[in-house]
Image (cartoon, rainbow, N blue to C red):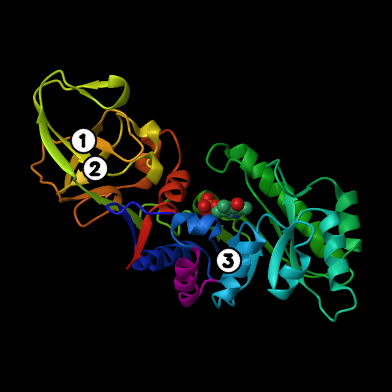
């Protein structure tokens, strides 16, 4: 892929460390923090982010797939790596050889792991994933028969943890409480059956900031590490571009495809080389704003593949001047959460879509 030459993502590893500090101070001492670095660390870069966090003393990493875990091991990461989406047939040896810890959600996976161990003197670690109401991956919380069968199949395997995922920590306190209660019950059942303590984890960012009762032994922290979810956190990823055209157009002139915007008076119109090919969503058309010299400047007309247009009536600027598209500079903050809301999505999607497409510069 050839990157956009004029627009880039600046990644502040200092802010990443700062955010880890904020998260640690929020949690009871001794609570483990798993850094969720799936999807190229939400577009921030899997390896540089993970190395910084390992230096900062992180307790583990969470990725979606086995391949991501292997990349981390090859980069020299030694902390536990949890595979949140489990694994599929054929990946057992990779898990074992790279000391990756899958979140297991079926008895079939347990059989596969047992078979892969074979006669080797190994006892690979795994966590059991419990579905307490997400309706996605996990042993269903009240299916004790299947859970019991899973445990009996655990001959050579080392179950070290138990996990669940909450579906509505932001939207429904009553349902979150129900999920937490279901999880408590399963955790107790498993710990009694196994006669040992397990690392229990249920909380993502929204959960651990708002439900201390759902923190258990470890949290899975994604978006908060990248700067969103609480006011003391700082954006890690900021997108910068520069003006490539400035001209004055007459009152009534229409801007961009579909002629959805007409100038209300003679206006200086700037062009910025960022568009939906860079992950700057088309749904931001006629809604978003950018920052130039500390001023808020509105985009006008539709977002196109490589460009947006802006109304520069309130800011004198020239071709070549820097533009803050998202994130933070010395004078302004345009949070990914704010931009995402304007585009009818969430910060996660915007960070992933822009971060993975743009050239990244680390500082
Ligand atoms: C992505 C993910 C997380 C991280 O959630 P944030 O809201 O970004 O903190 C935690 N747990 C699971 C299972 C996930 O898939």
Q: Is residue 222 left or right of residue 363?
A: right
Q: Would residue 61 be visible to someone looking at this image?
A: yes
Q: Which residue is mark 1?
A: 310
Q: Is residue 262 above or below residue 344?
A: above
Q: Is residue 48 magenta?
A: yes
Q: Would residue 218 be visible to someone looking at this image?
A: no
Which segment did they paint magenta?
46-58
Name the element at disc 2: strand
Q: Where in the figure is residue 280, as x and y percent of width and height?
A: 37, 41
Name the element at disc 3: strand
- Residue at image position (45%, 60%) is 225
As drawn, the label of residue 175 is none
Distance from Cα at disc 3 to Cα at disc 2: 37 Å
Crowding near the residue tagged with mark 1, few <14, some 14–19, many ≥20 C-alpha atoms within 10 Å: many
The quarter holding residue 362 reads: bottom left
Residue pushed farthest top?
252
Task: Report if the beta carbon of the residue with label 3 is closer than 8 angstroms to ligand 1.
Answer: no
Distance from Cα at disc 1 to Cα at disc 3: 41 Å
In this view, the mark in front (2 or 1): 2
- Residue at image position (23%, 35%) is 309
Taking depth in this image into account, of 275 and 183 the one nearest to the observer is 275
Of the numbered discs 2 and 1, the one sitting upstream in the chain is 2
The quarter holding residue 248 reads: top left
Q: For the N terminus, which image quadrant?
A: bottom left
């Amino acid at each position: 892929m050839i990157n956009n030459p004029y627009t880039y993502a600046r990644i502040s590893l200092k802010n990443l460390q700062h955010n880890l500090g904020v998260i640690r101070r929020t949690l009871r001492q001794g609570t483990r923090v798993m850094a969720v670095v799936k999807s190229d660390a939400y577009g921030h870069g899997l390896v540089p982010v993970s190395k910084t966090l390992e230096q900062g003393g992180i307790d583990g990493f969470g990725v979606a797939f086995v391949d991501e875990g292997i990349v981390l091991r090859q980069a020299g990461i030694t902390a536990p790596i949890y595979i949140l989406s489990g694994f599929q047939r054929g990946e057992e040896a990779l898990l074992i050889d790279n000391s990756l810890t899958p979140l297991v959600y079926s008895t079939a996976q347990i059989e596969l792991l047992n078979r892969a161990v074979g006669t080797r003197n190994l006892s690979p670690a795994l966590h059991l994933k419990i579905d307490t109401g997400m309706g996605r991956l996990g042993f269903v919380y009240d299916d004790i028969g299947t859970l019991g069968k899973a445990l009996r199949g655990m001959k050579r395997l080392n179950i070290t943890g138990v996990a669940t995922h909450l579906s509505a920590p932001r939207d429904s306190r009553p349902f979150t409480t129900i999920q937490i209660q279901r999880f408590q019950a399963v955790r107790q059942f498993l710990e009694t059956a196994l006669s040992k303590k397990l690392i229990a984890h249920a909380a993502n960012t929204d959960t651990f900031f708002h439900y201390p009762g759902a923190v258990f032994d470890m949290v899975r922290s994604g978006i908060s590490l990248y700067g969103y979810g609480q006011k003391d956190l700082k954006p890690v990823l900021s997108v910068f571009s520069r003006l490539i055209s400035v001209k004055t157009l007459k009152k009534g002139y229409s801007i961009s495809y579909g002629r959805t915007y007409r100038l209300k008076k003679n206006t200086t119109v700037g062009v910025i080389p960022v568009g939906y090919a860079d992950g700057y969503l088309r749904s931001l058309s006629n809604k978003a704003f950018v920052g130039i010299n500390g001023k808020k400047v509105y985009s006008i007309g539709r977002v196109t593949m490589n460009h947006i247009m802006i109304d520069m009536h309130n800011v004198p600027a020239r071709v070549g001047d820097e533009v803050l598209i998202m994130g933070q500079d010395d004078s302004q903050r345009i949070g990914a959460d704010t931009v995402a809301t304007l585009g009818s999505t969430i910060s996660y999607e915007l960070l992933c879509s822009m971060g993975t497409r743009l050239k990244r510069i680390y500082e």
